[in-house]
Image: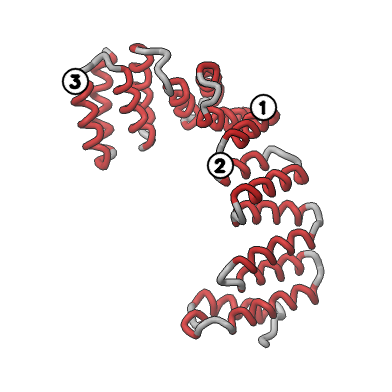
Amino acid sequence: MLALVLIGLSGLSTRAHPEIEDAVARINAQIAAAPGEAALYLERGELYARHEDWIAAEANYLRADELSPHLPRLAMLRGALSLATGHATEAKTHLDQALTRTPDDLEALILRARTHATLGARDAARLDYDAALARASAPAPDLFLERAALLPADAAIRSLDEGIARLGSVVTLHLRALALEESLGRIDAAAARLDRLAAESERRESWLKRRGDLLARAGRVAEARAAYSAALAAIESLPEWLRAAPDTVKLTAELARFGGTRP
C-alpha cells in the first residue's frame, strides 16, 4: 500500500515542482532497480523536503524508516520535517534520537535548539545554541541572532559581540546589538556602532542619518543635527550621477528637513 502511495505522490510532486523532475526521475529509476535500498527513499524525501513538499517527504522518510530505522541522518531529517510542519514536540523526539546516535551532529543540534525555542524551553535552547556555536567552525550569523533572542539584553549584546569577533563586522549583528544598546539607554555605545558601520562603508550617508535619528530620539538635538549635516557632506562628496539618484535626492531632502546643513 505504501508503495502505491509513494508512486502517486511522486507524480504529483514532480508536476508541482517541474524543476526537480530530472532528479526525481533519476532516483525513481534507482528505486525501481533496488526497491529495498533505504538510502534512496531518504534521498528522495530530502529532495521533496527542500521544495516544501511535506507529504511526499514524509512518505519517503517513513519508507526509509521501515527498511532501516537506524539509517544515518534519518532521525535528523524527520526532526527537521516535523519542525517545519509545526510539530515541535514530535521534532524533539526525532532530534533527541538523532543526537543520541550521533552526538556531534551539528545540524541536529541546531534544529533541536530551534525546537526547544519553539516549545518555550529557553534554557535548553540556549544550551544547544552554546554547544552548536562552540562546535561550528564558521557559524551563520543567524545562530548568534537566534541565541541572543533568548537572552536578557546585556547577555544578548555580549552574544552578538562574540559573533562580531568571530565573523567580522556583520551588519545584522551590529544592528540588533545597536537596538539593544538603545533599549538600555546606552546611546553613546549605540552611536559608536553606527560610527563603525559608517567608517567601514563606501556609502556613509545612510549610517550617518541613522546616527542622527538615534540622537534625536534621545533628545540630543544639536548632536543629531551635526550627524545630519555630516550625512549631507557625505552626499556632496559623491559623484553627480549618485547624487542625482532618486533615493539620494529623497535622503537629501529628509536630511535638510531634519535640520542638516550643507557644508
Q: Residue at x 67, y 64 (%)?
A: 196
Q: How is the image coloured?
A: secondary structure
Q: Which residue is mark 2?
A: 139
What type is the residue that disc 3 sits on?
A: Ala
Q: Which residue is mark 3?
A: 32
Query: Disc 1 and disc 3: Cα gap in Å?
Result: 44 Å
Q: Quadrant of residue 174?
A: bottom right
The residue sitting at the bottom extreme is 263
In terms of secondary structure, where does tag 3 sit?
helix
Task: Please report whichever mark, 1 or 3, sits nearer to the chain's N-terminal start.
Answer: 3
Work out which quarter of the rendered image holds the N terminus and state it: top left
Judge the density around disc 3: few (<14), some (14-19), many (≥20) Cα neighbours within 10 Å. few
Mark 2 and mark 3 in contact? Answer it, CB < 8 Å.
no
| Mark carried by residue 124 | 1
Query: Disc 2 and disc 1: Cα gap in Å?
Result: 19 Å
Work out which quarter of the rendered image holds the C terminus and state it: bottom right
Q: Of circles 2 and 1, which is in front?
A: 2
